[in-house]
Image: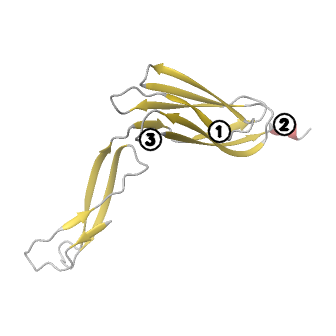
Amino acid sequence: MASYDRSIPPGGEGKITLTVNTQGYQGRIQKDAFVHTTDPGMARFTVGITAFVQVPISVSPRFVALKGDADKEVSKTVKIVAGLEKPLLIEEDRSRLEGKVRYEIQEVEKGRTYLVRFTSIPGNTGPFSGFLNLKTNYDERPVLNIPVRATFTLDKTRQEK
């Protein structure tokens, strides 16, 4: 979102205010705004903002995408890291993985880092989407939602038989 002085006299100064909504972002972000002028020597220029968004809990990647052979296990791991000084505790809340994907939560560094490993359950075919919700002890982010999308197909040589 931008606000700015509509008219600036030649040789004068003006003010441009840029506001960035950082909700849903974590880590380093960069945003650019294009400024159009009536100055023939500089009809357009760019103003950039770089920021580091510090979050109470970092989740990377923010979603899980599994794709592969329906008869083989396919796995992806999500890393969860505490961004505050106090210890982070997580526990299973609910999921919609419906017997297609299982998960395992491992505490790597006590109260700081967790790994959640998602693994397909062999025998399922087709597209699937679900989620895993984890409760936390952080008031700043009481629930972590990890979306899961998956596509499992049969090996083409077996489909032809």
Q: What kind of residue is marked 1?
A: Ser
Q: Quadrant of the C terminus?
A: top right
- What residue is disc 3 on? 141
Disc 2 and disc 1: Cα gap in Å?
A: 34 Å
Whether the residues at callouts 3 and 1 have beta carbons within 8 Å, the answer is no
Residue at 48% over, 20% down = 108
Residue at image mark 1: 95
Q: Secondary structure at mark 3?
A: loop
Quarter residue 14 falls in: bottom left
Q: Which mark is residue 157?
A: 2
Disc 3 marks a residue whose amino acid type is Arg
The tag earlier along the polypeptide, 3 or 2, is 3
7 lies above or below 107:
below
Q: Nearer the viewer, mark 3 or mark 2?
A: 3
Q: Residues within 10 Å of mark 2 (few under 14, many from 20)?
A: few
**Is 81 positioned to the left or the right of 44 in the image?**
right
> Which of the 4 quarters of the picture holds residue 47?
bottom left
Looking at marks 2 and 1 on the same chain, the residue that comes earlier in the sequence is marked by: 1
Direction from residue 16 to residue 21 in the image, left or right: right
Tell me which residue sits at (35%, 48%) in the image.
Answer: 29
Residue at 53%, 35% in the rendered image: 135
Q: Residue at x 23, y 64 (%)?
A: 17
SS under mark 1: strand
- Relative to 5, is 148 above or below? above
Which one is in front, 149 or 81? 81
Sequence-earlier tag: 3 or 1? 1
**Comparing labels 2 and 1, the label whose residue is closer to the camera:** 1
Q: How many marks?
A: 3
Q: Secondary structure at mark 2?
A: helix
Residue 52 rendering spot, x and y as whole percentages: 30, 44
Q: Residue furthest left?
A: 11
